[in-house]
Each structure stands twice: as structure tokens, then as C-alpha cells.
Image: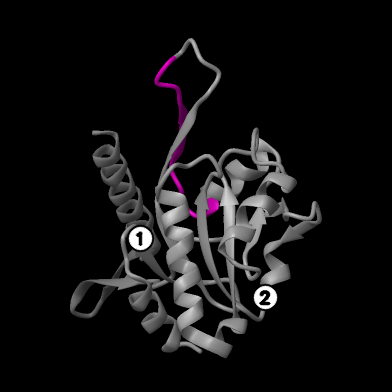
Amino acid sequence: MRGRLLTIVVAGFLIGALGGAALLVLTRGASGPSVETSGKALIGGPFTLLDQTGKTVTEQDFRGRYMLVFFGFTHCPDICPGELQVISASLDELGAKAAEVVPIFITLDPERDTPSAMAAYVKNFGSRFVGLTGSPEAISAAAKAYRIAYSKFQEDKTKADYSIDHSALVYLMGKDGEYIAHFPYGTPASKITETLRRYL
């Protein structure tokens, strides 16, 4: 049930983001009102976070390379490791061209996901991966910029353990940091590779 609810949240949030992306503008010409669109997706933006070495990084550090951005958390039992494995497999399929793409995993659980925890986690998916964390406020700002919905929940309130419900989307961002495409949870590695090859 929770997984189905998550899918609905993801779909609704994405529709809202992309719907707001193509801003509708009414103009009045000789033939009456017409509709124009800006065509720019309102996804992505500035962030200031810490990488897995503890170094402060911003979105500017990745300019000149494509980014595959995924938000999650290291205690995630299945969705996050599954998606990161798909990203890794896709980059393996690209071969040498993969050097033009940086896979970025941004935690939604900064309370537990310290830089050292992120370092230990992302190395499981290959040396290319960058793991980013930061203060709760910085994570919230990054998630908002990427239209990521997330919330903390505890099934057993008597225990300290908790989990995070979150949007499960991989974003492809251009060398200029602009949104290009997104891949819903379950997209095969071959499809991501196929899309990347159109730009590399």
C-alpha cells in the first residue's frame, strides 16, 4: 500500500512540476487570444552541499558534464540501491563516453547520512558516484529545487528507527545544469543509455 501511495505521490508531483514548467501565456493578436509556452522545465537549481569527502560543492562544480541526479537515503531497503545499480549499469554500457556524465546521489536523510556514511555507501555502485549530504535546510532546498517530495515516517513509534517516503525519479541534467529528461522508477538501464547517447 505504501509503495502504491508513493507512486501516486511521485506521479502527481512530477505532473505538477512539468505542468508548471511550460508556463502558459495568453496573448491577444489580430485573430484573438492565443497560447504560448515558455518550454523551460522548472526542475533543478542552485545547491550547496557536502560531498562524501566532506568538501563543500555547488551545482557549479558539475558544469561541463551531464548529471544523473537521484534523491534517496542509505537506509533505503530496495528502491534506492536498485536505482543506483541501474544508473551504474547504464554508465557501464556507455563505455568511455561515461566520463562525460556524473551520477549524483543526494540524501534525504542528513540526520544519519554523514559524509563518511555516504562515502561507504556510494562506493558500492562504482567510483564515478558522488554522494551529497548537508544540513536539513540545505537538503530541503535541493529537494525543493528538483521537485522532490519526501517525508519521514515511523511504523513503530516505540522504536528509534525510521524510514523516508520519497519521489523515485532519476533526472538527466545538461552540461549547463538545465533539465533534459527524467526516468521513472523501473526504467531499464538500456533506456537511460539510449537517451544519454542522443546527447553525448
Q: Amino acid at mark 2?
A: Arg
Query: Label 1 belongs to which residue?
Result: 18
Query: Label 2 belongs to which residue?
Result: 63
Label 2: which secondary element: loop
Sequence order check: which comes first, mark 2 or mark 1? 1
Q: Amino acid at mark 1?
A: Leu
Q: Is residue 102 left or right of residue 39?
A: right
**Residue 108 on image: x %, y %:** 55, 42
Q: Residue at x 62, y 51 (%)?
A: 121
Q: Residue at x 58, y 41 (%)?
A: 140
**Residue 164 on image: x %, y %:** 47, 35
Q: Residue at x 47, y 68 (%)?
A: 87
Q: Nearer the viewer, residue 134 or 178?
A: 134
**Residue 26 on image: x %, y %:** 30, 65
Q: Is residue 40 left or right of residue 188?
A: right
Residue 179, visible in the rendered structure: no
Q: Which residues are magenta?
A: 145-156
Q: Residues within 10 Å of mark 2 (few under 14, many from 20)?
A: some
Report which quarter residue 110 is drawn in: top right
Q: As displayed, is residue 129 above or below residue 156?
A: below
- Label 2 and label 1: CA atoms lie apart by 23 Å
Q: Nearer the viewer, residue 7 or 128?
A: 128
